[in-house]
Image: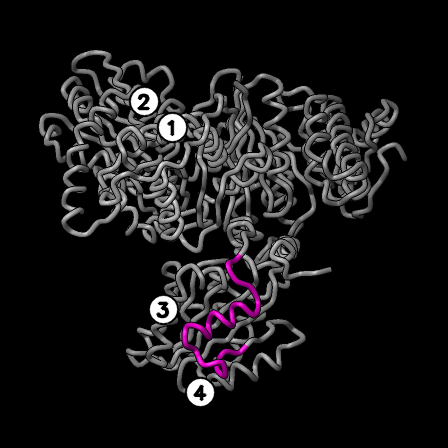
Amino acid sequence: MSEVILLGDEAVARGAIDAGISAAYAYPGTPSTEIYQAIQDHVKELGLTVRGLWSTNEKVALEEGVGVSYAGRRSIVSMKHVGLNVAADPFMNVAVSGAHGGLVLAVADDPSMHSSQNEQDSRYFADFAMVPCLEPGDQQQCYDFTREAFDLSEQLQVPVLLRLVTRLAHSRAAVTLAPAREQNKANYVDDPSRFTLIPANARRAYAKLVDKQPALQAYSENHAANKLMLRGEGRPGILVSGLGWNYLQEAMGDALDGYNLLRIGVYPLPVKKIRQLLDASSEVWIVEEGYPFIERYVSALGLMRERPIHGKLTGALPRMGELDSDAIKRCFGLPVNVSLQIAGLADVLVGRPPRLCDKCPHSDAYLAINEVIAQYAPGARVMGDIGCYALGYLAPYQAIHSCLCMGSSIGMAIGAAHAGMTPSLCVIGDGTFTHSGMTPLLDAARDNTNIKVFILDNSIVAMTGGQPTQVTDEEVVDLVAGLGVPREHIRVVTPSVQKKEQTLAVIREEMAYTGLSVLIARRACVTYAKQIKLYKRACGELVE
Amino acid sequence: MNYDLVLCGVGGQGVLSIAWVIDHAAHEAGLYFKQSEVHGMAQRGGAVSAFVRMSDHPVASDLIAHGAASMVLAVEPMEALRYTQLLRPDGWIVTDVTPLENDAYPQHEKLYKVLFSAPRLLVIDATRLAHKAGTVKAQNMVVLGAAAAQLPLPMALLEAQVQALFAAKGERISKANVNAFRIGAAASQFAAALLAAGVPSGVLARVLPRLMFEPQLVAQTSIDTWCERLLAPDGAQTAMRLFEAGTGIPVDGV
């Protein structure tokens, strides 16, 4: 037993390593990135053989994980909440096929959207797929639940979803580690029909999943982390999950002893315990981080008719954003602390939003695009995408006019062009392009759609802390050509002050052409210059 | 004992390194702690913060409640004011005086006027002091040193963790950071002595950021000299003059 200081994400990583994973896969995304990063670091440190990749995208990552499971070994696949949308297809179906070797998906939600475009709550996905969800409430539970998730996955032959949120993923505390378990020996699934979901097999497999539900329900009902604390008939009650428990303790302290409590960390929801709580309580507050998932469920049980329920749907707690202890205090009518007052504060405090770094190649690319647009197509729209370059939406660039989801820029530009928008422009980073920009570009190439695609190639996945990209430099050109874009309309420019005139000339030329052009603005990220060199050296591309 | 601490600054200023030192010192000291931080988009030159919560009981929330923090420890003066709603009415602000400007940054004079009105305040020129210690990047360790005496952790434990954090970066960087920490500690020892002698906070706030400290405690004779100067009838004007002159003055050089 040893105690170490770990981020919630790192505690998940250590839990997975100590549970005996043989492989790990991920696509970087805040707040989940540090899970795979920590696995890489610790594996090196511990001298273990754990295969892994920053996968091309979350769908691929999960499919790789399913392959490990098929071969009888354990793997963890990590992603941010919106990444699970990308991986939804294998996720929904591996729920049906079931797991063989332990398969755990660590998915980090981002309530308050610190680094995301929505607040979607992954507990719905677990419920949708009819698989268990473990929701740790502190760093120790991150470690313990991750280990347990693997055992559960093998015991009931289901993938298990581990739901994290930003404030746990990115918060540190001391964690006690337990002795590590050996990796599984390879042991291929004996009945391949399980993973061959043609309708005849799928019906059988789905029936199995349905049949597993009582066992999952029993697991959750009997789990120590779903703790029912009845203090007396007719007292007020609180149903609380995940980080809500921490904020509740912080806000209420000893006053909690006067309430009937049910603390939830394991799903499917323990319906019996919920009924017991509701039956014993005069009124019930529901405190959960994320969407009102439990609250809707409880409402549907019909048990709230006789007693008032207070939660996010009723307005007792904020519907949006993450919880904190002050929100709980307000909800229960408790006074919020007085804080230091300084006169004139508002006059001298201005916002400090993130911005592109000094000398960032994206800024030169945007200045060039803006200049050509101002000259030849004032008012033209540029579809944007996810990455550092989304900051191009802000002043002084104001260069992009959409940012929906990974890879959306190209598809949206195609649709807008079909709707008559000329010119139809879009920008996408090199990392995002291989994540999910290649398939829409294939569409554009088949159709020779009149769009201008700028691939902002900075040789790194920068926003999430500098992960390697799948292809670099000329490989990007070859990839684009391979998708069917004519080489004469694949133009490489250098976004820099020195090369500005050449860049402008190339953009003008391609704007004059009616058809698909791909302009690759290639210059390495200045912030991660060192990592880029390291990665290239590792690939043997850089000889010094 | 509960001690909530807000660390803040701008992405790239080393706020998370301060957090690392305090986490490990708290752990060594046998305290419970939780420390939350910001990753991702905000790190691109945006405002960043980290919360450290220490206690002799298990810590529940990863976040700091309104009016609960004992200190805001900042590496940038405007950022020092961004989290005052979390500060207790008797809480401290410890900050570097050096602005890192962005769009619409307030006039320095106006900013300082508001900042210097904070009742419990320690403002130093951590950037200049760090440069003197051997690397301007150690400004974070200077402000940590300045805050150290107030934290519920032994000074020696903190210093040992500073050393541990930079050990891998070589002798020169490690030494510069330890010196930066000690210089900050000297500034806080000096400030505490002057406040105890009755020098008003608003007066000290204008003198302290102009003083150059050594990585050792300030001699009593220097403390006495500065007390005399600043408690004189024209002490406030002296402070104003020194602050506006902007030059660094050796604390022992009067």
Q: Secondary structure at mark 1?
A: helix
In space, the residues marked 2 and 1 are separated at their CA atoms by: 10 Å
Badge nearest the viewer, 2 or 1: 1
Quarter of the image with the C terminus of chain A is: bottom right
Q: What span is colored magenta in the figure?
A: A469-491
Which disc is residue A33 wearing?
none
- Dot 2, how many residues are within 10 Å of its Cα: few (below 14), some (14-19), or many (20+)? many
| Image position, residue B79 (x, y; %) | 58, 44
Name the residue that disc number 4 marks.
A513
Tell me which chain the residue with mark 4 is part of. Answer: A
- Farthest residue to the right: give it: B253
Q: Are marks 3 and 4 in contact (CB under 8 Å)?
A: no
> CA–CA distance between discs 3 and 2?
45 Å
The front one of A503 and A186 is: A186
| Disc 3 secondary structure class | helix
Q: Which mark is residue A440?
A: 3
Residue type at numbered disc 1: Phe
Whether A255 is drawn above or below A460: the answer is above
Does residue A111 lie above or below B235 as drawn?
Answer: below
Q: Tell me: residue A82, above or below residue A497.
A: above
Which percent across, then down, holds residue A323?
36, 35
**Near-viewer residue (A368 or A411):** A411
Of label 1 and label 4, which has the lower sequence position? 1
Q: Residue placed at 58% from the left, 52% from the top?
A: B45
Residue under label 2, please give it. Answer: A225
The answer to whether marks 2 and 1 mark residues whose Cβ atoms lie closer than 8 Å is yes
